[in-house]
Amino acid sequence: MVIVAVLGGIFIIALIMVVVVYSRQQNEKKKIEQQRRIRMLADRGRQMQLLLEEIPPHYISTDFRVFIADQWLELLQEQQELGCKEARIKAEMEAAQNKLQEIRSSNQPTPEPITDLQTANGVRRNLKQLNKIIIGLYQERKIAHRIAQTYINEVKLGFTQTLVEVFRASARKAEAENNHRIAVVHYKRIMSELNRNNPNGIHNQTLLECREIIAKLEEKIAVESEHNDNQLASSVDEMMEGEESWKKKQVYDD
């Protein structure tokens, strides 16, 4: 009987130890998972911050920028809820709130069109990343299909706008240098980009302006071509006259 009691006690102690060890292991796993989740949320938050800083304001609407700032704030709040007590949280929370107030204010910076392809490609990379984020949020059922589609359409328009601005800058530079044929090529590139993504005819006015500019440039090209042809004809006439004079001189000398 005593032996049974001892064995029973040993079994209970062993069971308790197993339960304690298992509980500690689970708590450790939970802690590791929380840290992993916090790091992931922190990375997403920094990504939101980067997109707000690097995508020029005129490429996406104020509502879209507010949405991104709100997402940044939510990611920080979720980190707090998971027990993150890092000093950076407070600083980043203040930065996100300040950014949100800045976006909502009327003191938005004047849009500065992009003029070089390298900068445009940088903005396009960020727009692609933003598009990926929106699709991810929709797949996670955090935003409705209508909202996701609205923001994706804005990204597409911004994507088009980057190239339009670069081609327009190149066209105007060519015009200033009187390279009218090159300018026409760039304006036609603008039209090609706009025609690829022209929902509800949003770019119709710009397309019309490009057609009018191209027509004027082609008139100048035609005048220049005629002028060059006349100069060439005049040069040929002068050359022929010179050759005739030389022949007459040769006959006379003979």
Image (spheres, rainbow, N blue to C red):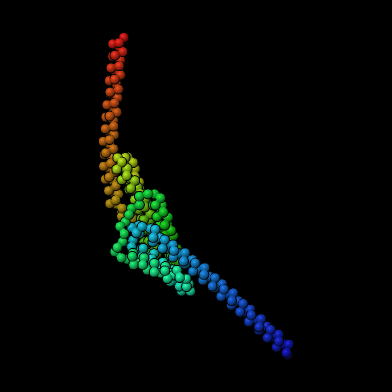
Q: Is residue 22 above or below residue 130?
A: below
The residue under the point 26% across, 39% down is: 219
The residue under the point 34% across, 43% down is: 185
Q: Is residue 193 visible?
A: no
Task: Tell whether 184 sits left or right of 16.
Answer: left
Q: Position of residue 105 (x, y in %)?
A: 30, 65
Picture mark count: 0
Q: Position of residue 41 (x, y in %)?
A: 47, 67
Q: Position of residue 230 (x, y in %)?
A: 27, 29
Q: Is residue 174 visible?
A: yes
Q: Residue furthest top?
A: 254
Front one among 69 and 61 = 69
Q: Position of residue 159 (x, y in %)?
A: 38, 54
Rendered image quadrant of residue 222: top left
Q: Quadrant of the N terminus?
A: bottom right
Q: Quadrant of the C terminus?
A: top left
Rendered image quadrant of residue 12: bottom right
The residue under the point 28% across, 14% down is: 248
